[in-house]
Image (cartoon, helix red, strand yellow):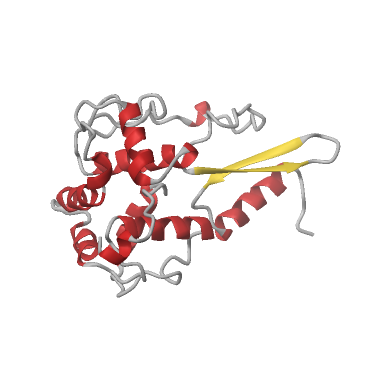
Amino acid sequence: MSETDNEIKVVAPYVPFKTLRGLVERLHSTAVPPVIDSSVLHSMSGSIRSQIMSALRFLGLISMNGEVSEALKRLVESYQTEGWTAALKDVIFSAYADIINDVNLPVGTDQQLDNAFRRHGNVDGQMLDKATRFFLAALGEAQVAYSPHFGARKFPQRPQNGKKTTKKKRSRKDETYNEPHEAVDDEADVAADMEKFRFPIRGKGHGLIIFPSEMDQGDWLIVRKMLDAYFGVSDQ
């Protein structure tokens, strides 16, 4: 980062890693513009747009005013090629150097990683969990081996040592769409890349909607139609 960038309090990325990968994929299939601005990120919600811009600056992929760096161009160009993991690894280790400088990456503890992110990544609480999740997801994508203790308490389903895990595909008979009132633990059962919206229902307590952070207006229109159909609400 430049001296100007260092004057600003930097925050470790806490956007879902798949959001960054999705942006790289879109730029790879279209073109890399000279700047990344709101028009390039028009399909994202306001909060996710702000988070991805912060992440791109932290990673050195854009300048403070959004100008695209050579690092982003190389990353986009390498997407879906043999050079992808190496390009991503260069970006990650360059950006996180100050944070993980005193962390033993191969065998360190989860608490050591958290402490490093608190001190040098300027995150805590839920943002800390999301920031470490992004970092570990990035390492996994870059096929970088890291301590099996990292994220063990918070992310039991995470990839181990940079290897991707496969989920057992559920059949139709395993789906539980006929059980819409399944209990959800407000904190423990909501993934870091999900948002919660609680609202009052007159005389019936509160309702809770859980949805992906990247959900946009088009997605909501589809969900609304599904809810209308469930409750028998007609458009007429």
Q: Quadrant of the C terminus?
A: bottom right
Residue 100 position (above or below residue 29): above
Q: Residue furthest right?
A: 203
Query: For residue 40, what is the image quadrant?
Result: bottom left
Query: For residue 140, what is the image quadrant?
Result: top left
Q: Pinpoint residue 195: horizontal percent, then vertical percent.
A: 55, 44
Q: Quadrant of the N terminus?
A: bottom left
Q: Nearer the viewer, residue 80 or 236?
A: 80
Q: Nearer the viewer, residue 26 or 232?
A: 26
Q: Nearer the viewer, residue 165 or 71?
A: 71
Q: Is residue 134 left or right of residue 182?
A: left
Q: Pinpoint residue 5: horizontal percent, then vertical percent.
A: 31, 63
Q: Nearer the viewer, residue 45 or 93?
A: 93
**Which residue is located at x 42 percent, y 39 percent?**
128
Q: Pinpoint residue 42: horizontal percent, then vertical percent.
A: 47, 67
Q: Give the total of numbered labels.
A: 0
Q: Is residue 29 left or right of residue 93?
A: right
**Which residue is located at x 49 percent, y 52 percent?**
214
Q: Pinpoint residue 190: horizontal percent, then vertical percent.
A: 53, 34
